[in-house]
Image (cartoon, coloured by chain):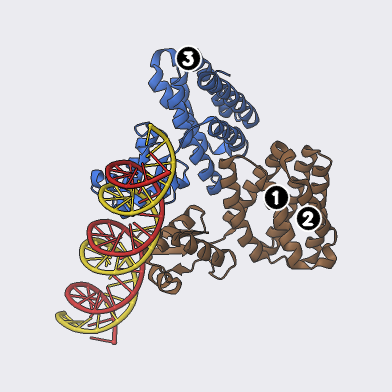
Chain colours: A brown, B blue, C red, D yellow
DNA sequence: CGAAAATTTGTTGTATACATTTTGTCATTA
DNA sequence: TAATGACAAAATGTATACAACAAATTTTCG
């Protein structure tokens, strides 16, 4: 794959932000990144610009680029958009979802207590990604993907501390999956709404003790 | 206002795309733009990159930057997102809409037959922008704004040829406005859904004779 | 000693030079 | 004539140099 240096820089920096290696409010120095990655400033700058559009960083004119913060407002906005779009995708594009992949994910979710937190975590991601990917609308896709990247950072903060929530989450996922499998997409959308509402409540609880 | 050269280039190029001065599929040459605008290639490139994120251009690696096309799929996707988000904003954030501005817009819409096409056109824009602006969710805002820019290009194509549609559109706008004024935001959302559905049908008819 | 001014340092913004790739031209050949 | 390949021209991708600005530091003066 003949990828550009800009894309390389983009991928590396994004991964560092999403993984929490760069914490919120960290200032990203262009020359430092340039030296470290062995890439000149120009592609670095372009990558940072791209990341700004995903709202993963804020470019402060003449000051620098700063890893964006995840405050309450951001968390609320992220969940709001997810609750609008993910059920919508199920209703509109449910039939386009890959059933085989669903079954694979379901089997992992069913063994939530055995497979461990990390596998569960990843499988959760897979489910949402699978649903998101079924949507052919480019504009909707960009919106939800941007939001979903931020969501990964939120989950890093919550850390899924409660195993109780993990089990509940798994059964909610299964409810969504089962509805899709019997091709009742309205029910699937409702199950997703329920799931997101619960996740929202759990997140509120863990992060803000509300 | 101490705006950067990148922003200047961005503003100029964007205006040219939205106004139709640059037609779809036009290749945008970086050095040509650089010479014409008296700005070096670096800010020009950054501006084009920004425009790519708004899907107003496509950057083809090693080939160049091309003004994006408005084909049937794009038109469908745009309307789909508008029909999802605009009514949602009314339902969720209706109370935040500036009522005074609404009254001003209403008076123009009421005289649709007198004020002429252009004023009508602009007032239509104002209404949708006003509603969009009432939404405080940054993620939703970016999504709908991106879509609304493209929508301007669609309207350029349809050219609002039918005066019948113009009159109908005005009365639909008034239905939305009146519902907001009496603070019945559910009704307002429904009126908006109706309006967008009709616009969608009219657009289909004009552009694709479907 | 403290505050304001001047200077230095470091960072981003912009311009330009160089590298790489694509594309168009034109001669060559089957 | 049509296809092919070498070559030239032009475009984008990348690196680097310079300019403008902000912040930190030092100096100067009350």
Q: Nearer the viewer, residue B98 or B124?
A: B124
How many numbered marks, from 0 up? 3
Q: Are marks 3 and 2 on the same chain?
A: no
Q: Residue A36 in the image: x percent, y percent?
A: 44, 74
Q: Which residue is mark 1?
A: A130
Chain under numbered label 3: B
Q: Residue B103 in the image: x percent, y percent?
A: 47, 26
* Secondary structure type for disc 3: loop
> Label 1 crowding class (10 Å Cα cut-off): few <14, some 14-19, many 20+?
some
Pointer 2 and pointer 1: residues touching (CB < 8 Å)?
Answer: yes
Residue shown at the point (73%, 62%) measured from the top left: A121
Tell me the mark number nearer the camera, choosing from 3 and 1.
Answer: 1
Q: Which residue is mark 2?
A: A105
Q: CA distance from mark 3 to mark 1?
A: 43 Å
Quadrant of res D16: bottom left
Residue B162, labelled with which disc? 3
Q: CA distance from mark 2 to mark 1?
A: 10 Å
């Amino acid at each position: 794959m003949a990828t550009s240096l800009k894309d390389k820089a983009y991928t590396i920096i994004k991964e560092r932000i999403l993984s929490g290696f760069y914490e919120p409010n960290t200032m990203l120095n262009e020359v430092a990144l340039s030296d470290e990655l062995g890439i000149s400033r120009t592609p670095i700058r372009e990558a940072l610009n791209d990341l700004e559009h995903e709202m993963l960083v804020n470019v402060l004119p003449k000051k620098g680029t700063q890893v964006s913060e995840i405050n309450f407002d951001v968390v609320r906005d992220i969940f709001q958009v997810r609750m609008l779009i993910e059920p919508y995708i199920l209703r509109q594009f449910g039939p386009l979802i890959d059933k085989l992949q669903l079954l694979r994910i379901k089997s992992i979710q069913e063994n939530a207590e055995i497979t461990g937190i990390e596998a569960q975590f990843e499988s959760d991601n897979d489910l949402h990604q699978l649903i998101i990917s079924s949507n052919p609308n480019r504009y909707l896709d960009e919106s939800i993907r941007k939001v979903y990247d931020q969501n990964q950072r939120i989950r890093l903060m919550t850390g899924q501390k409660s195993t109780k929530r993990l089990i509940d989450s798994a059964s909610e996922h299964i409810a969504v999956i089962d509805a899709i499998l019997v091709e009742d997409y309205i029910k699937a959308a409702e199950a997703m709404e329920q799931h997101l509402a619960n996740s929202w409540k759990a997140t509120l609880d863990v992060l803000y003790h509300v």
